[in-house]
Image (cartoon, rainbow, N blue to C red):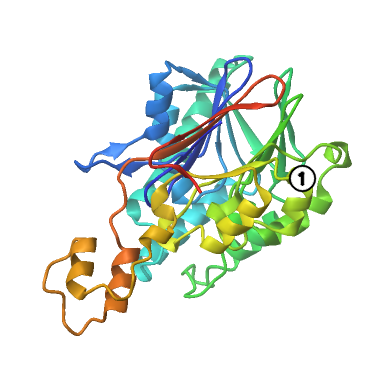
Amino acid sequence: MHVFGGPRDGEGIVLRFPDGSFAVIDSCVSKDSNGDTEYPILRFLNDRNVKKLRFVCLTHPHADHYRGLVKILRSLEVQEFWQSQALTFSQLKSIINLRRQRDLEFGDYPKGDDNDELHLLYELLKEKLEAANRQRRKNGFQFQLIGINRLLSIHSSVDVVALAPHGNEVMNLEYQLGSAFDEDGRIKSKFDQNINSISCAFLIRLPAFNVMLGGDVESRSWKLIVPAIDPAYAGRLQSSLFKVCHHGSDGAYCKELEDTFVLPDRRTDFVVTGYYPSKLPRPEMIDCLKAAAKSVSLTHRSHIRLESDLRPLNSSREALAREFGIAIPVQQSASREAISETFQVRRPAVANFGRCSFHFDGKGNLVSHDVSDPAMLV
């Protein structure tokens, strides 16, 4: 499993199964020093001469998860596309319209390019489905809707069990979308829309070990999900590797998750994809994970504030200005504390993507764990 994370946001996962097939869950993009768009997952696959994907999955329609999927679908042969069962076509149109209107009226949603890419993604999927229907090939392109307890067989030795979304969360989102517009079809100034609640999450089951992929599902949803997991799976849920939910936010880890999916005696490896704009993961969450984990990996070092990043308050204004690359003299009315806080948050991040790779043998042993700079062990 190869987990990618960007300097500010973005999350994507590449899976390689025992039969040599590949799959992609979510995607991410960034800009290089020339302002050109980088596609780290596609570059990774091209470097390994991968031409075909067993499946591509969009866990949920947030820009940091779907940016780059159009490029992947256009560049490689994809057998199946997986998405949350909550996303009907009409609901997707509502989400896109909500974001476009919020962007225009309130300026607090992703800008037009991101909304357009989501629309383009589903136009492309429509074209692929129509082509598959015309050709009527047995192994043609397929669309899979993902919900709790859905079992997807990948290989004779590999099953993927969908853990989320829960049906109650699907209905909650439908209600939220339905109540977001007034009687004239205009968006209300205030409304609830918890897209993370309908994120997909998966348990990948192999003969000797499991891998848990938490998507962006948060603790409120896990309190519904864990009691509803099919008893047929209940005997074997603890996982050797856990992709931590929702960038290590405050709701990313809870007792239900630890008791159900984490091996005792600190035998589970954790990997976190941070989210720079919200300063995730917080140090408290990293400490919580380290207390339960064999190891904790972070896909990009800009997502965590290390002790070395905490500047002493006795540094002069001039020293702080040099540290953060701003003009001297610094505005004299600004305190040292204000300068440190402001520019520590806005400090330029490393431009390239980090990658955390985990390689297992047939007995479930982690034989290698590669952390590619700017990814890091914490």
Between residues 287 and 54, which one lies in front from this camera angle? 287
Crowd band around label 1 with a 10 angstrom C-alpha radius: few (<14), some (14–19), many (20+): few
Between residues 125 and 18, which one lies in front from this camera angle? 18
**Residue at the extreme bottom:** 333
Left or right, 82 with reference to 304: right
| Point 45% across, 58% down: residue | 97
| Point 38% across, 20% down: residue | 47
| Point 51% across, 57% down: residue | 281
Left or right, 281 with reference to 241: left
The three-letter amino acid code for the residue at tag 1 is Pro
Between residues 366 and 137, which one lies in front from this camera angle? 366
**Is residue 35 in view?**
yes
Is 239 placed above or below 336 here?
above
Toward which corner of the image does residue 311 lie, by quadrant?
Answer: bottom left
**Is residue 197 in view?**
no
Image quarter of the N terminus: top right
Between residues 373 and 42, which one lies in front from this camera angle? 373
Looking at the rendered structure, the secondary structure element under dot 1 is loop
| Point 75% across, 26% down: residue | 208
Percent from the top left, x then y, of residue 225? 76, 52
Left or right, 190 with reference to 111: right
**Label 1: which residue?**
264
